[in-house]
Amino acid sequence: MLQVRVKPGVEKKLRNRFPWVYKKEIASYSRTPKKGETVVVRDFSGKFIGYGYINPEVNITIRLLSFDKNEKPTPELIKRKIENAYNYRKSLNIPSNAYRLIHSEGDFLPGLIVDVYDKWVAVEFTTYGMEEYKEVVIETLKELLNPEGIYEKINEFSKKVEGLRGEEQTLYGTVPEEIVIREYDLKFYVNIPEGQKTGMFLDQRNARYFLRQLIKGGERVLDVFCHSGGFAISARKAGAGEVIGVDISDLALELAKKNEKLNGLEGIKWVEANAFDFLKEQHKRGEKYDVVIIDPPSFAKNKAAVENALRGYKELLVRGLHITKPGGILAIFSCSFHITEQHLLQTLQDAAFDTKKVLRVRAKTYQDLDHPWILQIPNTLYLKGIWVEVLN
């Protein structure tokens, strides 16, 4: 097995169970590494740290799977980790038949995402090393879940960076174009092959429910970047009055309309528009809302993109604050690990200064519990939401 030594000082974070070794942190190899192979990671003095897999072509060169000298990476270990993740989900009593079963590093299986949609499963391998375990992953999912179908999703960014070999395809059984899932007393259509991520933003389940608690009846609600309508439909179900959902994708809006009808609702106004332009126009017209939800896609896929991303957030927040009524609620979300909660808070402060608004924080929401956040692995916390009340 390939032996890898890390530079002095790197061992501290690894012994705290952080699972990544960056290329610049590697001191030496016992031989030339092969892409995807299993490695032993040692500190600079040669003491054991853990086992992982390697891709010498990428910045995050090694991802650790085990910190136990007697627990080598084997198909049996991968199977046991999947079973542990499954048992954890069963303990959560999730109010839905759709949930995330494997959350990559959050379940100590870096490079693997698995989402369950009723009787069907979507899997995503995001690293070359985890692709090596594809067979045991699929077999374990079949044993645990007895699904009617398993579909492999491909993240094009990961495919390019890692050199992945997979293609989008049905790996087992059959997967229909549309699946109906339930969330509390709501229903949503999911299209695994065509949907964003693996089909739906399951991580916002608790935020959608929180929004429903804020609605007392008759509120005017704006859902910007509405995608398949989760927030807009939740607000309407809770008794909101005028509800507007805005998205630039006509396909997303068609799905949102179907979801509205599926829940026996009507009256939501769906607008195909650029969110920045729409908010600017609403401000210009003097429109006001009781609740404004701003849930953009990831503006920052890496650290280099943070500065531009924050400018985008600032513009959204300035426009959003201008159209939120005094006493109204504005919520802003980031689904990028690189945009931190502190980034959001500071940008809110800057936008409040520019608009001369006083803001009271009403809540913070994060990804739901089936997307585990491990304290020692900061990147497992990626979704942050700040809900503020506009006091003037």
Image (cartoon, rainbow, N blue to C red):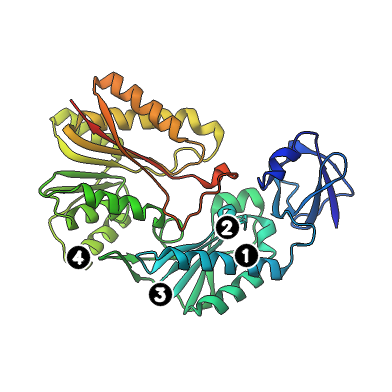
Q: Residue 261 bears which disc, if any?
A: 4
CB contact under 8 Å: marks 2 and 1 = yes
For the residues labelled 2 and 1, the Cα–Cα distance comes to 7 Å
For the residues labelled 4 and 3, the Cα–Cα distance comes to 20 Å
For the residues labelled 1 and 3, the Cα–Cα distance comes to 29 Å
Q: Residue 271: tell me if it is visible.
A: no
In the displayed structure image, the side of residue 157 where residue 180 appears, left or right: left
In the displayed structure image, the side of residue 39 where residue 278 appears, left or right: left
Q: Amino acid at mark 3?
A: Pro
Position above or below: 270 against 113: above
CB contact under 8 Å: marks 3 and 2 = no
Helix, strand or loop at disc 4?
Answer: helix
> Which one is earlier in the sequence, the residue at label 3 or at label 2?
2
Residue receiving disc 2: 107
Helix, strand or loop at disc 2?
Answer: helix
- Counting from the top left corner in percent of width and height, residue 308 is at 46, 29
> Which one is earlier in the sequence, the residue at label 4 or at label 3?
3
Residue receiving disc 3: 176
Helix, strand or loop at disc 1?
Answer: helix
Residue receiving disc 1: 81
User: Toward the viewer: 92 or 211?
Assistant: 92
> Which one is earlier in the sequence, the residue at label 1 or at label 3?
1
User: Toward the viewer: 15 or 79?
Assistant: 15
Q: Amino acid at mark 4?
A: Lys
> Which one is earlier in the sequence, the residue at label 2 or at label 1?
1
Q: Amino acid at mark 1?
A: Lys
> In the image, what residue occupies the spot 35% across and 22% down?
350
Position above or below: 323 against 47: above
Q: Amino acid at mark 2?
A: Asp
> Which one is earlier in the sequence, the residue at label 4 or at label 1?
1
